[in-house]
Image (cartoon, helix red, strand yellow):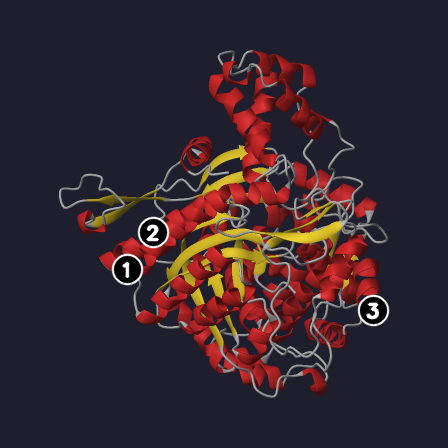
Amino acid sequence: MKKGVLICAALLLTAGCGRQNDDKMDVQDFKWQIDRFDDVKVLRYQVPDFDSLSLRQKKLVYYLSQAALCGRDILYDQKFALNLPIRKTLEEIYLSYGGDNNDPRFKAFEKYLKKVWFANGIHHHYSNDKFVPGFTESYFDSLAASTPSLNGKEELLALIKPAIFDPELYRSTCDQSDGIDMVTSSANNYYDGVTQKEAEEYYASLVDSTDPRPVMAGLNSRLVKRDGKIYEEVWRLDGTYSPAIEKITYWLEKAATVAENPAQKATIEALVSYYKSGDLKEFDRYSILWLEDGDSQVDFVNGFIESYGDPLGYKGSWEANVNFKNIEATKRTEVLSRNAQWFEDNSPVDSAYKKEEVKGVSAKVITVAQLGGDAYPATPIGINLPNSDWIRRDHGSKSVTIQNITHAYNEVAEGNGFADEFTLRDEDKELARKYGALAGDLHTDMHECLGHGSGKLAPGIKGDELKNYGSTLEEARADLFALYYLGDDKLVELGIVPNKDVMKAGYYNAIFNGIMGQLTRIEPGKNIAEAHMRDRQLIARWCYEHGKDDNVIEFVIPENGKKYVVINDYDKLRDLFGELLREVQRIKSEGDFEAGRRLVEDYGVTVDPELHNEVLERFAKLDIAPYSGFVNPVFTPVDKDGKIADPEKEEQIADIKISYPDDYTEQMLGYSRNYSFL
C-alpha cells in the first residue's frame, strides 16, 4: 500500500488566499515564478535558516543533495523505456538549433521539451497521458537532419518517432481503467512480456502467510518474461541502473562521514548496503533505522519508494528529498504526535479496526533543501513513511509537512483571482483569507501524521487485497481522518487552532476542490485517473449525494448564471466525513475489494461533462496554470578564501553557499550534462 505522499493540487489555489506570515523569509524582491508553459508554472522555493546550520550539517545537506540528483535518469527509464533516448535526442536538437527562435514551430518544439523535463518523460506527470506534440513529424525530421550529432542515427529516430507522434501507442504510463489488463495497457517500464494475471500470480506465489514481517515484494525490480520464464531484474549496484546507483552510493558514503550522530550514520550506511545488495530485508532494516532517528535535524528520503506509477502497486519509483527540521513550526505537529492515541481512540471507525496502542508516531515540519526523481520538479507537500504495513504496526511512522513548499505556492496564488471567480459567499472568501493556509497545513499534518498511521488490518489480511484501488482508498482514508478531526473541539483545546472557523475554511476547500476545483486539471471528455484526484472527488461527491436530504452541500446558481458550491451545514458534513471514514477503514481492514471498487468507480472516476466544461471556461479566463513545480537551489562548496572548493576533498570545504537560479531551461540542461548516468 502507498501511504507516503500528499500531493498539492488546486487545493492551494484557494488556500493561497490565506497568506502565511513568516518573518524568517525575506520575500521582498524574490521572484517566485520563473517560467510558464502549457498547463505548468515553474517556481522557486526559498530555504530559510540554511545559514544557521553548522558547517557539518551544511556538508551533510550538500552530499545528500548530490545523491538526490544522481538518480534522475532512473525515473525517466522507469516511466517509459524510450524516455531517455527521446529526452537526449530532443536536447541535442535544441542545443544545436541555429534557426529562428521565434518560429512558431520551434516554439512548439521548445514547449514540448520543457514538458518532457517537467514530467520526467513524454507522459503527463499527473494524468499519465501521453503528450501531443504541437509540431509535425516532418518538422521534427528537418530539425534532426540539421543536427550533426544525429547524423547516421536513423535507427534511433525510427524507434522514437512513433512513440512521440503516434497517438495510439503508449497512451498512458499507468492505466487503471476498470476491466482491462492494466499491465499490458500501461506504457511504464516496470513489466516486460508479462500480463497482469501472470504478474499477480508471480507475486502471490512469493507470499508466506506465516511471515509476520514480509518484505514489499517487487518494490525494487522489473518483472520480465523471457523464453517462458518469469523473473525479476533487480535495481541495485552491479545490476539494473548500476551506473546511477554507483554515483548515489558514492555521495551517500560521503554523507555518512559527516552524519550528525551515530544513529544517522548507521541509517545512511544501511541504505548504501541495500543499494549494493538489492535485498529488501536490508531496505526494511534501513527503514526502521530511518524511522527511529528522531534526533537529527537534517533528514532525507532516497530510494525506490512510492508505487503510484505501477497499476498493480508493487514497483517503487525512484525519488529523493533532502530537508532539515523547522523547529518552531514542528511544535504544532509534536502536539498531534503526543495525542495520537486520543485521536485513534475517538475516531468513528469500528473498534475492531482501531489500534490498541499507537506506536512510534512522529511528525515534524521541514524545510526542503533539494528535490529529486519523482519529487522533482513537481513535489508532494507532505510525506508519511515507511510504507511497510508491519513496520508501521511494530515501529510506527514518520510524517513531515513541507512548509517552505506550501509557502511558495501561497505566495504565487496570492491575488490570482481564483477565489473571486469560484467562491460565491463573502464569508467563505474571508474564512479562506484568514484561515486557508492554517487549515491546509493542519490537513497535511493530520493526513500524514494521524490518518496514514491510524487503523489496523483484520487477522489474515495482508494489505494488498484492494489492488489497483488501494492507493485511492488509502489516500481517502487519510484525508477523511484529517477532515473529521479538523472539526473537533480537541484542536481548540490543544491550542492548535483559535476556533472552529478553521474547520469551515478547510471543509469548504475540500468540497469545492473535490467537486469543481480539480476539474481544471482534466482534459475535456476525460475521466479521473490519478489516485489523489479520485480520492478527492470520491469524498466530495459521496458527501454531496448522501447529504442531499438535509441539503448539507448544494450547487447554487445566482443571476450571473454561474454554478457555485455552498456548504449549508458544517456539523452534518463532519458527520458524513465520519460515516465515510468508518466504511473506508472497514474496506481496508477487511480487504473488501468489491466494495472498494464500487466506491471508487461510483464516486471517484466519472466527471460531470456539463460542470466540467463550465469550470474549464471560467478557469481559462483567469490565465492560471493549474500545475506547479520547482527549480532547485544550488549548493556550492567554498574554501576559506571564498573560492569554489573540490567537493571530494571535505577538509577544504569552509562553507556551503546557497543560490537560487531563475532559469528552468538551464537547470534542466545542466542536470542532463552533469547527472546523466544511464
Crowding at mark 2 (Cα within 10 Å: few <14, some 14-19, many 20+): many
> What residue sits right under mark 3 in the picture?
595
Q: Classify mark 3: helix, strand or loop.
A: helix
The circle drawn on residue 602 is none
Residue under the image location 53 percent in, 48 percent down: 239
Provide residue 517's location: percent of width, then percent of height.
67, 51
Horizontally, residue 119 falls left or right of residue 128, namely left
Q: Residues within 10 Å of mark 3 (few under 14, many from 20)?
A: some
Label 3 or label 2, whichever comes before in sequence order: 2
Q: Is residue 192 above or below residue 322?
A: above
Query: In the image, what residue occupies the spot 66% across and 21% down?
Result: 135
Measured in 3D between alpha carbons, the distance from the residue under mark 1 to the one under mark 2, in whole angstroms, is: 9 Å
Image spot of residue 492 (x, y percent) = 52, 79
Question: Would you say 543 lies left or right of 369 here?
Answer: right
Q: Residue furthest left?
A: 641
Q: In the rendered image, is residue 25 in sight?
A: no
As helix, strand or loop, the secondary structure at mark 1 comes to loop
Looking at the image, residue 459 lies above or below residue 89: below
Specify the label residue 63 is tagged with: 2
Check residue 258 in the rendering and tell me which mark sits there, or answer none: 1
Mark 3 or mark 1, whichever is nearer to me = 1
From mark 3 to mark 1, how far is it between C-alphas?
A: 50 Å
At a point 74% along the width and 72% down the height, the residue shown is 584
Q: Quadrant of residue 510?
A: bottom right
